[in-house]
């Protein structure tokens, strides 16, 4: 964390930049069958997280969205949170 002083004397903090987990794991292609990994990039309402929130690079974010859509079409992932609630009860 880098600290710099402003004119007012308060320190200014910079947050650490997020790193793409797919790049770190050296995954070239995001697989729609890897449901556990895809689930990490879905919100509690089963929406795909943005790049800003998840930290993925643009290339993997595009692949991720296609993989999630494919997995939903094949019923590997739910479309909405209502599907999760009705399945558990």
Image (cartoon, grey):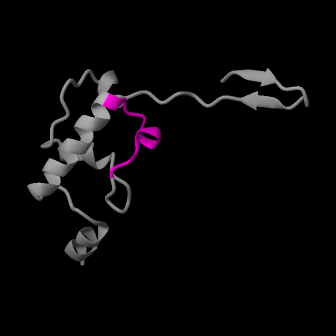
Point out residue 3 in the picture as x, y percentages from the top left corner. 75, 23
Reply above or below: 44 against 85: above
| Location of residue 16 by image quarter | top right
Point out residue 58 in the picture as x, y percentages from the top left corner. 34, 31
Residue depicted at x 66% and y 29%? 14
The answer to if 87 sits in the magenta stretch is: no
Q: Which residue lies furthest to the left in this view?
A: 74
Residue depicted at x 25% and y 39%? 64
Reply above or below: 1 against 69: above
Q: How many marks?
A: 0
| Location of residue 9 by image quarter | top right
Residue depicted at x 20% and y 34%? 30
Quick check: 75 left or right of 60?
left
- Which quadrant would the C terminus be assigned to in this image? bottom left
Point out residue 19 in the picture as x, y percentages from the top left corner. 43, 27
Point out residue 79 in the picture as x, y percentages from the top left corner. 23, 62
Residue depicted at x 78% and y 22%? 4
Quick check: 37 left or right of 73?
right
Quick check: 53 left or right of 27?
right
- Which quadrant would the N terminus be assigned to in this image? top right
Q: Residue furthest right?
A: 8
The segment highlighted magenta reads 48-58
């Amino acid at each position: 964390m880098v600290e710099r002083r402003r004119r007012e004397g308060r320190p200014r903090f910079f947050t650490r930049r997020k790193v793409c987990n797919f790049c770190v794991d050296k995954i070239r292609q995001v697989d729609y069958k890897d449901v556990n990994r895809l689930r990490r990039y879905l919100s509690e309402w089963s929406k795909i997280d943005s790049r800003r929130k998840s930290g993925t690079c643009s290339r993997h974010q595009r692949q991720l969205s296609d993989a999630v859509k494919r997995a939903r079409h094949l019923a590997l992932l739910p479309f909405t949170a209502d599907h999760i609630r009705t399945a558990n009860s």
